[in-house]
Structures are given as C-alpha cells and as structure tokens.
Image: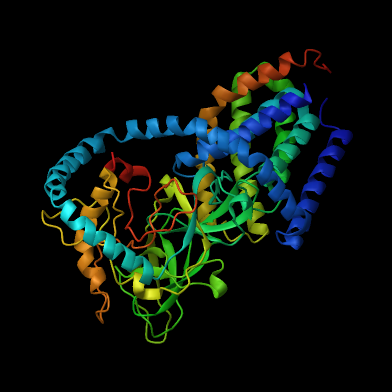
C-alpha cells in the first residue's frame, strides 16, 4: 500500500483530530474532560510506573555507584577522618543527650516553619524530548495531596504538585521554564525566581532600588493562603547579578540547592506552617553534612538531632554543632550568610516509620544521592 | 499484528522512557524509545498503520504521567512520523541501513516538530537555544538505541503478521 488518496485522507483526519485535541485542551486550560483524563491516566498508570521504578532503582543505583568509584575513594578517606573525630564526640553524647531533649522540645514548641509533610519517592521523570521538567511521585490524593502543594527535600525547594492521581502525582520541578516562585532575601527584598532547565535559575527583583549580591540566600516568600508555596523554603543562592543603572531592576541567576539530576525522596507540604517563618530561616546557615572541615572534637549542645543514637543522627549532629551558636543567637540584627555554607534548617526528609511524622528541624540529613553514603 | 501486542509495546516504551531513560539525566534530551517503537511498527505496517499507531502512542505520551503539556501535541507529531516512516516500508524491507537512517531522521524531525509546536502554542519552555541543544542529542541517542530496539520489534511485528500484503 503506497501513498495514495486514501492514506492521505487517513493522515489528514488523524492530524486534524490531534490538532482539535490540542485546541480543546488549550481552551479547557487543564480542566474539564482533559484534566480528568490526566488524573485517570495518573491513577491507572502511576502504579505501573511505581512497580517499574522499584524494579529499576537497584540497577540504577548500582550503575551510579560504578560511575562514582573514582570520587568514592576520596570520599572514603574523608569519611574515615570524620569517623575518628566522631568517635571522640561519641563519648560526650550521654552528657549532652538530656540537654538535647530539652532543647528539642523547646524548639518544637517555638519553632516557626513547622510543616506537615508527606514523604514520597520520585518514580519517573518526564521524557518530553528534554523540554519538560516534571516528575512522578508515589503519593496521591489517597495520601492527602492536592494540586498546587509545595514539594521540597532536605536541600530545599523541589517544585509544586500539578496533577494528582489516586496514588501518584505529577510534580512541576523548579527548573521547568514554566515554574515561577516568589522569593525573599534576608533583608526582606522580594524577587521572582524562574526555572531555566539545566542552567541556573533566573532571578528578577521587584523593587528597582533593591540590590542583591552573589552568595545571598533565597527562601520562598509564601503565596496567598500558602498555596502553592509555603513560606520559608530554601530555594538557592545567588551566583551572579547584573549591575544595572539606578532605577533599573536588577536580574541575576540562582543556583538551586536541590540537585535535580538525583532526585529521590521528597516531601510534600500537606499542611502549611501556622506562622510565617519568613527570613527567620535564612538567618541560620548550616554547613551540609558533606562538609568535612568543620567537625570539632568538643561540640556545644547540638541543636536538634533526634535522640535516637543512630549513626546517621550522629553525623548530622556533628555537622550541626557549629550551627548551634548561629541558631541560638538568631535574634542578632544582622544575619550573616556565608556563601560556602548551605542554609538548610527546614524539616529534613528522612523516612520515618510514622506515616506523617512531625518534622524536626534537623538540618539536611543525608537525604538522597551522593550524601547517602554518610549514614552507612 | 495483534492490537494487544501494539498496546503492550507502546506502554512498555512509555514506562521505559519515563522510569529508566529520563532519570539518567543525560546531556541534552533523553532518548525516546516510544519514537523507535512507532518507527519500527510503521516500517512493517506501512503509512496508515504507522499513522494510527503514532497517533495513539502519542496520545498515550500526552496523557501518561508525568506529562504536563497540551494533550494532542505528541499525537500530532508521532502520527506524522508514523505516516512518513511507513512510506518507506517497501524500501526498508531489504535494507537495514535505510531503516536506521529513516529512524535517525524521524528522531530529529520528531523533536524539532514537537519543539516548534510548543513555540506555536506559546509554551514558555521552547526557545531557539532549547531546540538547538536537544535536536542533535535526540538524533544521536535514538540512532544509538535503534539497533537494539528496531530490528527486534520489526521481526516481532512480522512474525505476528505473516500475510504481509505485497503490492
């Protein structure tokens, strides 16, 4: 059967149908029959993807491990150094434990930025020829998710939910060009950050007289009714900024804290914080767990680690020890942001047996990917 | 060619795309197995079969999570790709090379069309830069993958459809 009138007619009809669908969906704007088609597809196909992801994940991790053998040996050396200094600290632990409990309780009471999180695993990533940056997570309306909820992980803002199926949902990642979020700097200036695919995110200040400089940290400003964005989630740090003339709006680029190439475990904010933490969260920068230099032999009372005594919490605790001073003196008028340290005092995304655990203000415990080795 | 087999192949390709290939985070655009499946089936079934399979495979890619674009966009692109590749059925019967070349062209055209369609529909994600960086990558990736996917699916399709119409 070669190209003839009949085949061309069939093609024309199919193309016309496709174009009609596009037009209708464009007009429905994600709602109506098309929205429910997407939700139905998510409900039916999500579980399939979930199973497939479970099968594939060990293989993928193994491949990633092979790829990082070279960098692993250096990491092992660093970790060994860390272990030896941690062992010293371990002897001090019983004395500190009681104080930690007390402090922890206090912090929980007074802590701003208490989100209620639902934890989820990223099971699929969009494959739309590299134009689209979305992901499927294995939590849906069954778990209390709704469209337009903030998604974050231990490092910071991941994105927001768009289509919510029964047991899976789609997340628009923060690096998608259609993603825009209002952010706030430590001194209260506001700006809009937009995704630019694999490049650093773009930053545009609102106030023409406001200025930022590289190294400044950004948190979400919070949307009306905390939807889609709750306030106070770490977004990234400014890496470059233009030098505009007076009266011109400054722009720049922002490096997100989250590593979008290795998304694994994320948390969805199902219940926003009672009070708006705003820049309170910016004022306490914390070195990440992977920072190996700041481990001291005599920790001052660690701020927040859960008193479970596991190795993982030990690592976290050691990394926080230098942060304690910063967070207790948070009321100091000038919050200092060290460019090298990564502020991450939002709830960590560590899986817990409790389905909806109260988030503790532990700084980014090794949540996923490369930092995962620190716990084991 | 059984309908069930086509459906299974298309869904399998969609899963492999979003669960296996896209999370690899390769530079440029991820490889697209669904396109290879459509091209391979079209090379066996001809233009009409190719157009139909392309349309419905594209529709699946538009709806299945985590897709987040206008429904019908991939359907339009893959329908056209299925038709065009299907036109080469007679020629591709004897030449593996031609089959591979047609798949390579199809990969480039599909990415380009999908991107341009985004531009027409004022999808903020598509710019000249995005197109320039993704099209070459998608061609390279799909050509690398094609020898592992296309002959296998073509022989599977031929076996389940022994009475190929010769004209």
The x, y position of residue A85, in whole percent, is 12, 47
Q: Position of residue B62 (x, y in %)?
A: 68, 46
Q: Which of the two residues, A87 or A252, is positioned nearer the viewer here?
A: A87
In this rendering, position of residue B62 left or right of residue A305:
right
- Whether residue B105 appears in this view of the structure is no
As drawn, A179 above or below B56 = below
Determine the image quadrant of residue B61. Answer: top right
A304 over A45 or under it: above or below: below
What residue do we see at 43% from left, 58% from top?
A: A358
Say which of A368 and B24 sits in front: A368
Which of the image's four quarters has the C terminus of chain A? top left
Q: Nearer the viewer, residue B109 or A259?
A: A259
Q: Quadrant of residue A104?
A: bottom left
Residue in view at x 63 percent, y 54 percent: A163
The percent coordinates of residue A217 (x first, y second) are: 34, 68
In the displayed orientation, state which residue is furthest to the right. Answer: A6
B4 over A272 or under it: above or below:
above
Q: Position of residue B14 (x, y in %)?
A: 62, 36
Along the viewing direction, whichever of A40 and B43 lies nearer the viewer: A40
| Residue A357 seen in the figure | yes
């Amino acid at each position: 059967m070669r190209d003839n009138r009949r085949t061309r007619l069939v093609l024309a009809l199919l193309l016309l149908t496709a174009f009609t669908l596009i037009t209708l969906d464009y007009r429905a704007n994600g709602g109506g029959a098309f929205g429910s088609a997407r939700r139905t597809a998510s409900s039916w196909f999500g579980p399939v993807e979930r199973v497939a992801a479970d099968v594939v994940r060990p293989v993928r991790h193994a491949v990633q491990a092979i790829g990082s053998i070279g960098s692993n040996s250096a990491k092992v050396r660093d970790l060994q150094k860390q272990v030896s200094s941690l062992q010293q600290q371990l002897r001090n632990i019983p004395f500190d434990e009681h104080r930690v409990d007390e402090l922890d309780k206090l912090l929980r009471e007074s802590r701003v930025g208490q989100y209620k999180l639902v934890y989820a695993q990223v099971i699929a990533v969009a494959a739309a020829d590299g134009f689209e940056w979305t992901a499927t997570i294995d939590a849906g309306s069954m778990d209390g998710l709704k469209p337009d909820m903030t998604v974050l992980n231990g490092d910071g803002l991941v994105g927001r939910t768009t289509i919510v199926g029964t047991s899976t949902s789609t997340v628009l990642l923060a690096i998608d060009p259609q993603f825009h979020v209002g952010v706030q700097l430590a001194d209260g200036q506001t700006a809009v950050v937009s995704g630019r695919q694999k490049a650093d995110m773009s930053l545009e200040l609102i106030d023409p007289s406001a200025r930022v400089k590289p190294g400044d940290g950004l948190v979400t400003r919070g949307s009306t009714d905390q939807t889609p964005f709750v306030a106070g989630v770490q977004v990234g740090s400014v890496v470059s900024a233009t030098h505009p003339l007076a009266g011109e709006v400054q722009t720049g680029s922002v490096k997100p804290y989250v590593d979008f190439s290795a998304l694994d475990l994320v948390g969805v904010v199902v219940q926003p914080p009672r009070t708006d933490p705003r820049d309170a969260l910016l004022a306490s920068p914390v070195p990440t767990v992977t920072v190996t230099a700041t481990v001291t032999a005599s920790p001052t009372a660690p701020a927040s680690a859960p008193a479970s005594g596991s190795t993982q919490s030990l690592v976290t605790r050691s990394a926080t020890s230098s942060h304690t001073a910063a967070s207790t003196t948070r009321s100091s008028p000038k919050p200092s942001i060290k460019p090298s340290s990564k502020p991450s005092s939002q709830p960590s995304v560590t899986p817990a047996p409790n389905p909806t655990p109260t988030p503790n203000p532990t700084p980014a415990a090794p949540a996923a990917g490369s930092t995962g080795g620190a716990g084991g | 060619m059984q309908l069930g087999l086509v459906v299974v192949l298309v869904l399998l390709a969609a899963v492999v795309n979003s669960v296996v290939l896209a999370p690899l985070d390769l530079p440029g655009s991820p490889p697209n197995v669904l396109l290879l499946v459509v091209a391979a089936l079209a090379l066996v079934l001809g233009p009409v079969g190719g157009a139909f399979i392309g349309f419905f495979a594209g529709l699946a890619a538009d709806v299945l999570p985590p897709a987040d674009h206008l429904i019908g966009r991939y359907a339009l692109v893959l329908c056209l790709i299925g038709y065009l590749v299907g036109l080469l059925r007679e020629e591709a019967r004897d030449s593996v090379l031609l089959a591979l070349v047609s798949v390579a062209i199809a990969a480039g055209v599909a990415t380009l069309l999908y991107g341009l369609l985004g531009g027409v529909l004022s999808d903020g994600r598509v710019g000249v830069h995005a197109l320039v960086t993704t099209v070459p990558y998608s061609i390279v990736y799909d050509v690398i993958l094609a020898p592992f996917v296309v002959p296998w699916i073509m022989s599977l399709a031929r076996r389940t459809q022994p009475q190929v119409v010769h004209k």
